[in-house]
Amino acid sequence: MERWIWLGVLSFMVRLLAIPPSAPADESPTTQPGPNVPSKNRPLKEKLDRWSLDILVIGNATTTVLLTRENIREAIRTSGSFGNIADNFGNPISSVREGTREDRDPFVINYVAHPLSYAGMGLYLKERGYRDWSALLFTQIHNITWEFAVEGSAFPPSGKDLLSDLSGALVGIFLLDRVSRYGEKKLEAPDKKFYHHFFYWMNPFNVLDDKLLKKGKVALVLKVE
């Protein structure tokens, strides 16, 4: 039963990864690739370049979080094992049930920090040009990897964390990013209101990219050309 669950999840991920990314705002969807890059190969190369950079950026952010959580770091050092990871993936339902029962993290950690961090990840990916479902997939691959393999090497995966992370990503991708785009559009209109600035800031990565990166004030790359 659990083997079929993982097969279905894998099939769904492959289908989503096959969706081409959205064209950057300053590039026409019909832009032709350069003479040295075959048109049939360039889209895949661009996606791989973008995925590689985003995995690096989010991986570094995750490592930073791990280094600041002494209890998790110490548990992984003393109790972490590949056997625990194999058991988590081999028996996901029972592992999640056990992890949910054992999860006694404070309310702020489970229901504030977790969803906020994944909302932020989703907003970052949207500013990078990902389609909604591709961005959601990216966040949930990270979610599962953390719960089942990283933290999961020492603790069974928590259903509370999995759902909080999913809910945060959904809100960030499907609500906050849309509100930010709406605010950005309204700020360009003659009838703009003060509260449109608040809407615009719903995706801080959008603001950062527009106000600093695109004006060359910060030496940080968020766009893969």
Image: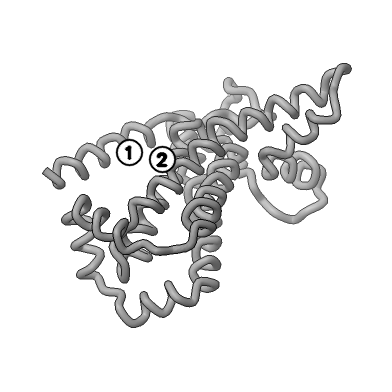
The answer to which quarter of the image holds residue 113 is: bottom right
Q: Is residue 189 above or below residue 92?
A: above
Quarter of the C terminus within the rendering: top right
Using a 10 Å C-alpha cutoff, classify the residue at mark 2 as few (fewer than 14 neighbours), some (14 to 19) or many (20 or more).
Answer: many
Q: For mark 2, what is the residue?
A: 137
How many angstroms separate mark 2 from mark 1 (CA)? 7 Å
Q: Secondary structure at mark 1?
A: helix
| 72 or 222, nearer to the observer | 72
Q: Is residue 200 above or below residue 95?
A: above
Q: Residue furthest left?
A: 1
Amino acid at the residue labelled 1 = Met
Q: For mark 1, what is the residue?
A: 13
| 47 or 212, nearer to the observer | 212
Q: Are marks 2 and 1 in contact (CB under 8 Å)?
A: yes
What residue is shown at x 29% (from left), y 35% (from top)?
12
| 12 or 178, nearer to the observer | 178
Where residue 52 appears, as percent x and y from the top left, is 48, 51
Where residue 102 appears, as percent x and y from the top left, is 31, 63
Amino acid at the residue labelled 2 = Leu
